[in-house]
Image (spheres, rainbow, N blue to C red):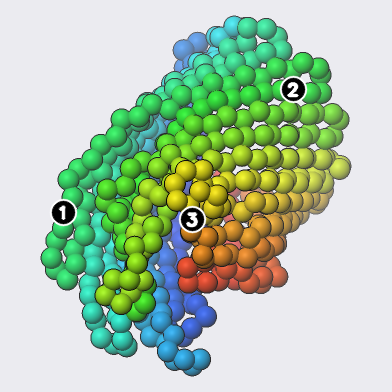
């Protein structure tokens, strides 16, 4: 459930206020298996036109998440028991401020800004190796704070050439990290990162329907609270976090073509990236009768591939979009050299059909194909290929009031979403609602 109010405070000041509430109750393939999620959230923003001084955008958000999952161990075909229960809570809030201004032919646009985000999360875990016998309690949690400042300049030295340069500087900090096992605390010292992420891109419209572009960039991904402090256990398996994880660092580039002719537009993209300190699962071995793996910086990854995107407007009411991506993502350094990267299918494809009838009916049908992949970088936890079809429809019943119909995984396709436990992905989900605009 979500509601949004769009506000016009003056000719130069516009804003919005959005609030939502998501409550899901899911059951698995066994009687004791369940996963419940509750997320209330709120967001607001202002767009201010300063005339000759540019435009300013201010946004803020807050979300509280409570996640409860009961994982089970199967005794036989008719009997199971809760072996691992998690109650995870988090508070996520932040704001952003951005300014931009157009200057003319050479410096077409300049923008700058900053953003702030804070996440405070905790996971309470109960471990049962046998039915109804509590063997361990584990509490993991911490806080993450990120602050970023950025600037971007768009240059047009010639009519058909555009150069885009940007630089972002981030401060990222972990604090209050802790793992408490059976009441015994293990606290971790605070860690901070200060990193710069540049990007340089260029585009040349060398003939009217065809343009070529290229980009080179760098970035990073800091480990999440779950990777740092959240563990997982079953009677035979233990997954450990790693408070000493380093951030992933990426350097890469892409080159492509844009094509626009009549009702058809398309893109052909090629890309190549390298990731250092990739975060994955490292096998530790048997500890206390349980096969144990730990989240670690396991390898350096290289990833290259091609992407095709096409859009065709059949009529004013009907349009079709298709896409295909080929990715070759493998380990290129270390003992796992040559293995496929975890969670990286070689082939993905999709389509989307949009139809808006003259009498107001809107229908969006989309399908996506995902090739087989692996849950782990050791390539021992496979996830099979699958095709999912979704459908969305809306119809205006009175002025600003619409009724909605949403069907996800309409044909109830079964597929493995978690290779470690061979757990199935979300089944058919059908919902409806109303949307009121004012």
x and y percentages locating residue 174 in the rendered image: 26, 44
Q: Are marks 1 and 2 in contact (CB under 8 Å)?
A: no
Query: Which of disc 3 and disc 1 is earlier in sequence?
Result: 1
The residues tagged by marks 1 and 3 sit, at their Cα atoms, a distance apart of: 29 Å
Along the horizontal axis of the image, is 180 left or right of 233? left
Q: Quadrant of residue 254?
A: top right
Which residue is label 2 attached to?
211
The residues tagged by marks 2 and 3 sit, at their Cα atoms, a distance apart of: 38 Å
Q: Provide the secondary structure element on which disc 2 rests.
A: strand
Q: Which label belongs to residue 391?
A: none
Comparing 331 with 134, the one in front is: 331
Q: Does residue 307 sit above or below 107 in this rendering? A: below
Comparing 161 with 186, the one in front is: 186
Q: Neighbour class for label 2 at 10 Å: few (<14), some, many (≥20)?
A: some
x and y percentages locating residue 164 in the rendered image: 56, 19
Q: Quadrant of residue 172?
A: top left
Query: Which of disc 3 and disc 2 is earlier in sequence?
Result: 2
Q: Neighbour class for label 1 at 10 Å: few (<14), some, many (≥20)?
A: some
Query: Which of disc 2 and disc 1 is earlier in sequence?
Result: 1
Q: Quadrant of residue 73?
A: bottom left
Q: Neighbour class for label 3 at 10 Å: few (<14), some, many (≥20)?
A: many
Q: Provide the secondary structure element on which disc 1 rests.
A: strand
Which residue is label 3 attached to?
377
Residue 395 visible = no
The residues tagged by marks 1 and 2 sit, at their Cα atoms, a distance apart of: 55 Å
Which residue is label 1 attached to?
187
Q: Residue at x 57, y 29 (%)?
A: 253
Q: Residue at x 67, y 13 (%)?
A: 161
Q: Does residue 38 sit above or below 236 in this rendering? A: above
């Amino acid at each position: 459930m979500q509601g949004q109010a769009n506000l016009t405070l003056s000719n130069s000041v516009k804003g919005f206020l959005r609030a939502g509430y998501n409550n899901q109750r899911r059951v698995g393939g066994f009687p004791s298996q369940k996963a419940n999620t509750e997320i209330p959230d709120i967001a607001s923003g202002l767009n201010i036109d300063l005339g000759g001084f540019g435009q300013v955008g201010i946004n803020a958000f807050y979300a509280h998440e409570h996640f409860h999952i009961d994982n089970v161990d199967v005794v036989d075909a008719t009997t199971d028991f809760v072996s691992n229960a998690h109650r995870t809570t988090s508070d996520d809030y932040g704001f952003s401020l951005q300014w931009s201004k157009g200057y003319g032919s050479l410096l077409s646009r300049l923008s700058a800004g900053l953003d702030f985000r804070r996440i405070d999360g905790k996971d309470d875990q109960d471990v049962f190796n046998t039915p109804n016998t509590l063997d361990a309690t584990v509490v993991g949690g911490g806080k993450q704070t990120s602050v970023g400042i950025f600037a971007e300049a768009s240059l047009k030295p010639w009519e058909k050439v555009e150069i885009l340069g940007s630089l972002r500087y981030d401060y990222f900090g972990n604090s209050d990290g802790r793992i408490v096992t059976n009441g015994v605390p293990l606290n971790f010292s605070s860690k901070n990162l200060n990193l710069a992420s540049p990007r340089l891109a260029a585009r040349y419209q060398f003939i009217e329907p065809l343009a070529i572009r290229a980009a080179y960039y760098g970035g990073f991904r800091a480990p999440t609270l779950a990777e740092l402090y959240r563990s997982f256990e079953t009677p035979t398996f233990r997954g450990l976090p790693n408070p000493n994880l380093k951030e992933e660092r990426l350097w890469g580039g892409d080159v492509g073509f844009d094509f626009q002719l009549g009702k058809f537009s398309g893109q052909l993209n090629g890309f190549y990236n390298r990731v250092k300190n990739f975060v994955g699962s490292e096998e530790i071995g048997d500890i206390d009768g349980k096969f144990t793996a730990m989240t670690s910086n396991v390898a350096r990854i290289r990833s290259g591939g091609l992407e095709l995107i096409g859009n065709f407007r059949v009529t004013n009411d009907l349009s079709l979009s298709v896409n295909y991506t080929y990715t070759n993502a493998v380990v290129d350094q270390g003992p796992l050299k040559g293995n496929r990267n975890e969670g990286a299918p070689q082939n993905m494809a999709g389509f989307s059909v949009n139809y808006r009838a003259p009498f107001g009916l809107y229908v969006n049908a989309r399908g996506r194909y995902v090739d087989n992949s692996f849950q782990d970088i050791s390539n021992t936890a496979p996830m099979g290929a699958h095709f999912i079809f979704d459908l969305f429809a809306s119809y205006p019943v009175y002025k600003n009031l619409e009724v909605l119909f949403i069907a996800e995984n309409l044909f109830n396709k079964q597929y493995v979403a978690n290779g470690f436990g061979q757990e199935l992905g979300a089944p058919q989900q059908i919902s409806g609602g109303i949307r009121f605009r004012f």
